[in-house]
Structure formats: structure tokens, C-alpha cells
Amino acid sequence: MTALSRRTVLVLAASLVVAGCTDPGSGGATTTSGPATWADPAGRLDGVTLTLWAAQNSNTVPAKVIADFQAATGATVEVVTIPDPYEQGVQTRVATGDKPDLAFWQPTASMLTALNAKNNLQPLTDAPWLPQLAPELKDITGILDDTRYAALVTSPAVEGVYYNKEVFAAGGITTTPKNFDEMVTVARQLKAKGVTPFHEMAADRWATQWWVQVQLADAAKDGLWEKINTKQETFSSPVVVDAIKKYKALIDEGLFNADIKTATFADQGRALLDGKAAMVVQVNSFFGQLQASADTAALDAKVGFFPISPTGNVGTFIPDQSNALVAFRTGDAKREAAARQLLAYWMGPGYPSFVADRKTISLEPSVPTPDGVPQALKDVHASLGTAVGSMQASAAANPDLYINLADMITGTMTPDEVAAATQTQFEQLAKAAGVPGF
């Protein structure tokens, strides 16, 4: 089965959930037992057991907050790891009626649609922690059809440029680029000095799409994804095709690593940290790889971050499943209330300990970000205030653009073929998900 047909089958399976469920109402703040209520976050829950689904890269995230919640309330919380590919595994289980009480989930409109949020998820519209969030983060994600279904617990990922400070300094680069073309100019200056400007991981494929998406940041700000969602534009429109062609032209120019076709995610991290490449266009998980190889002091000395777009330093945000949680409608009113209580505890009295334990950036101004968070991650977080939505955050469906781009890099597709194949799959996915007009 091709990647296209696998993805289409998956969304078709999700659409069966829609067809097989009754409509609980307008999608407002109601639960199985009626209007949502929020208990004391530390209220007793003796005898209550909750199940939380997590991916292999998020199953340790809640360890501290769960331990604290259990001690405070008497509840039991069991974390169940769903094997990768996580999203496919969760959707398949939910389609068969198997639901947890909570799950880590990508809080984008398309992925909330994939879970049939209106029927399967509890609304979190009036959650008590929302006033504590930084204003620019409150409504950045987690909302579908004006109803909030996901609780953001960590800083959303951003597509941007990680660079080696030492390589820049040695190459005489004293300031970071102010737009995409300036970045290309810097790359050419570094190449002239014998430095590999950019590193890409086409063997693992998934990061190839960031190069196209950062070039679409300005268009996204002007409503590109909404236009694609409503057929006013397509992936074959000039704005998208030109971004794909520019990406290929930079590769053909020799501005990337010579082993681009076979390089992996791990290779990419080593290349930047070791100074074998100057820049990498990536998301937050890339920096997590660097943190596994170097301490904060070394990372602060070597690695910086800047957002990039055609006309400025605008980031492209792409929240992933490790950033947020959803609470399911299970039909058990007591467990549903307890699931909401866990979220309220997590983002309320348990939040200072959570961010301190994870050494992660605080989303709440009243809770300080702990010492030990690398400056690059602080810079990533700071870019969220002006960031625009990625394809994953804003498109009605998420086709496998990255697979097609990887095929372009290996020489089996042209830019126009990449665009056409991506559009065809987008239309199939949108139709399967019941997007109006498809």
C-alpha cells in the first residue's frame, strides 16, 4: 500500500467514527453528564483510575505531575504507551470504540477533526487555567469550530533555523539573517569559505517540508491555508510551487550536505553540533536531540535560533502531540470529571513543579521558567507571539508533502509533480474527513 492510500484509509476509518456516533449537541461545553464543571484540582478521588495514552517520546513527560496528583487526590493514573506511529494507532483504536480518559494529541484543527472531537472529546472551553496562560498562547491552538478541546501544556514547536554560533563567527557572520534571501546570501558566503551552509535529512524525510513551509509564512499570514481549504488556491498554485522550486534550486546549487539523500535525523544533529554544517531548518524536537548530546552551557555557547520567512523573522508554529492533551467522552461521568480535574491540577497547583521537573518553558507568566532552559529554546518560545500557522496547524487536511519532497530530492519527482501529488492527496483526505466543498 502506498503512503497516499495508507493515509487515505486512515482518514476514512476516522470518518466511520463520525458516521457511527450520535450528535451530542452543538459542541458547547457539555460532557456526558451535562454542562462541564471543574472540581477542586486537589479534591479527593479515592478509588478512581484514569488511563492516559502517550507516545514513546511523551510517555515520561507527565511522570512528576501524575505522581503529585495521585498523592494529592488518591486517584490512580495509568500511562499507556501507544507504539509509533502514534497518531495512526490512536485513531485506529478510537475508531473501534477503545478510548482512554486522556491522551497526548496534536492540538490542530485537522487532528482534532481526525478524532471527531465533537463526539469523542470533552470541551475545555471554560477551563480554570486559561486566564493564567500568556495572552498570545491562549488561543493559538486546540480549538475546533470555536470550541476548545485541547489543553496546551508545553510550548508549541516552531519551524525555524538552528545555527552554529561558532561557525558563523569563524565565517565573519556577526548578525543573523533578517529574511529568507539574506539567509541564502549568508549561506553562499559560508560556502565560499569551505563551509557546508545547510544540512538536510532526506533519508528520514519528515523535515523536508519545513523548507517549503517557512517560505510560505508570509502567504500563511495572508490566509493561504484558508484559501487552500476553500479551493481558492491549491498546492499547485504558484506561491507553493515557487517555494518548492526554490528549495530544489538551493539543493542543486550545492548549498546542502553532499550526503543529503542518505542523511538521517541523527546525522543532522551531529553535523550542526560538530560544526560540519552551519544551519538546519527544523522544529523543537531537533533541539531535544542536541540536548541528549550536550549540556546547557555547551548548547548556549554553540547553538542559536532565529525564525525566518520571505520578508522577515516570522516563525511557523506546528504544535505536536507532546505539547497538549485531550480528555475523552467515555460515558463515565465520574471519570470524565476526574480527567478534567487532572488537567486543572496539571495547569494549576501542579504546574510549577511540572515545569521545574521538565526544565521546560512556562506558559504562565506567574510561573517562572526554571533555570537550565537553553537560550535557543527561549528564543523559539519568544517567536510564538508573531508566528503563523503551519500546514499542520491550519490546513483542513495534512497530505504527505514531506514524502513527495524527499522523492524530489532523490530524483524521482519534479517540483510540479510534488505539488500535484500533494494536492490530489489533500483533496482525498479532505473529502474523507467531510470538509465542506470536497
Image (tube, rainbow, N blue to C red):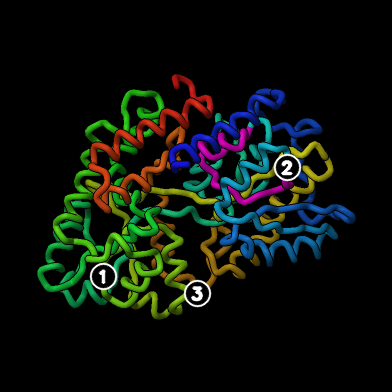
Does the magenta-highlighted stretch encompass residue 306?
no
Q: Earlier in the sequence, mark 1 or mark 2?
A: 2
Quadrant in the rendering for residue 76: bottom right
The percent coordinates of residue 293 (x first, y second) are 44, 77
Q: How far apart in space, not on screen, are marks 3 and 1 (Cα)?
A: 26 Å
Q: Which of 150 and 213 is in front in this view?
A: 213
Circle 3 residue: 372
In this view, the mark in front (1 or 2): 2
Displayed quadrant of residue 84: bottom right
* Region rendered in magenta: 98-117
Q: Is residue 26 above or below residue 259?
A: above
Left or right, residue 236 beside residue 205: left
Query: For residue 139, which numbered disc appears in the image?
Result: none
Residue 112 among magenta residues: yes
Res. 217 in view: yes
Residue 188, x across and y down, in percent: 13, 62
Give neighbour class at mark 3: few <14, some 14-19, many 20+ (Cα, 10 Å): few
